[in-house]
Image (cartoon, rainbow, N blue to C red):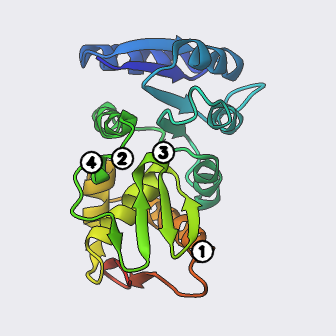
Amino acid sequence: MAKILIIDDDQAINELIKINLELQGYEVMQAFNGIEGFAKAKQEEPALIVLDVMMPEVDGFTVAQRIRQCADIAETPILMLTALSQLNDKINGFNIGVDDYLTKPFEIDELIVRVRALLKRTKQIPKSSAVRELLTYKEITLIPETYSVKIQDKVQKLTPIEFDIFNLLFQNHGNMVSGAKLLKEIWGYEPDDNVETIRVHIRHLRSKINKISDGKQYIETVYGGGYKLNV
């Protein structure tokens, strides 16, 4: 079973998460500050990291950034625990490369669902692109080995989640993909409070695609519904 590292200075929460993940059969390691957590992440190379934001000395954002800059663990999924609910805080985390957020206080069942969904990303090829009908259509080519998209002769690297989102839109090009379907296919669950999560990832994805699109707007927002890729 997968190895999970919890980095949280709140011993009660850390222990609660550990007990419940172990009941699910996971091997769980604990760290109680950012310095210890980063060291254990490098040493143990866990399949997933549960990371708190508000920690003394070194906060969760800094730890996440260091993880993303360390080649051996750069692709490790990170579930960030935070008492912060502002959109700017989520944007900060997503810019660093955090995969998902869970706001305190949270239900332990929801944490387990999100852990299971994120662990599906541990394979080299992203989950939603493991079975594909096509890799190239007109001027667009997907490169799953490097999580990249090529338009004409320009290549843009994406995060694994951004690649999965683009691939889902790509496989349904010309048709709207609802927010509910994005949550179901990419994150593996359908919470009713994660509209901001989708919007933030789409915003970052659109910004990256626009760098190689020569002015063409490929990703269209269908207001009240979802998103569509126009090729």
Closer to the chain start, of discs 3 and 4, is 3
Give the camera-side residue of 54 and 34: 34
The image shows residue 21, relative to residue 107, as above or below, that is above
Regarding residue 195, the answer to whether it shows in the image is no
The picture quadrant where one finds residue 153 is bottom right
Camera-near label (3 vs 4) is 4
Give the camera-side residue of 38 and 131: 131
Residue 69 locus on image (x, y percent): 68, 36
Closer to the chain start, of discs 4 and 1, is 4
Q: Distance between the Cα atoms at labels 1 and 2? A: 22 Å
The picture quadrant where one finds residue 74 is top right
| For residue 62, side relative to residue 84 (left or right) | right
Q: Distance between the Cα atoms at labels 2 and 3? A: 13 Å
Which residue has dot 3 on it? 99
Callout 1 amino acid: Ile
CB-based contact (under 8 Å), mark 2 and mark 3: no
Regarding residue 87, the answer to whether it shows in the image is yes
The image shows residue 101, relative to residue 35, as above or below, that is below
Closer to the chain start, of discs 3 and 1, is 3
Quarter of the rendering occupied by the C terminus: bottom left
Q: Distance between the Cα atoms at labels 4 and 2? A: 6 Å
Camera-near label (2 vs 3) is 2
CB-based contact (under 8 Å), mark 4 and mark 2: yes
Which residue has dot 1 on it? 212
Q: Which residue is depicted at the point 25% across and 55% down? A: 184
Q: Which residue is depicted at the point 59% across and 71% down? A: 207
* Mark 2 surroundings within 10 Å by alpha-carbon count, few (fewer than 14), some (14 through 19), many (20 or more): many
Which residue has dot 2 on it? 126
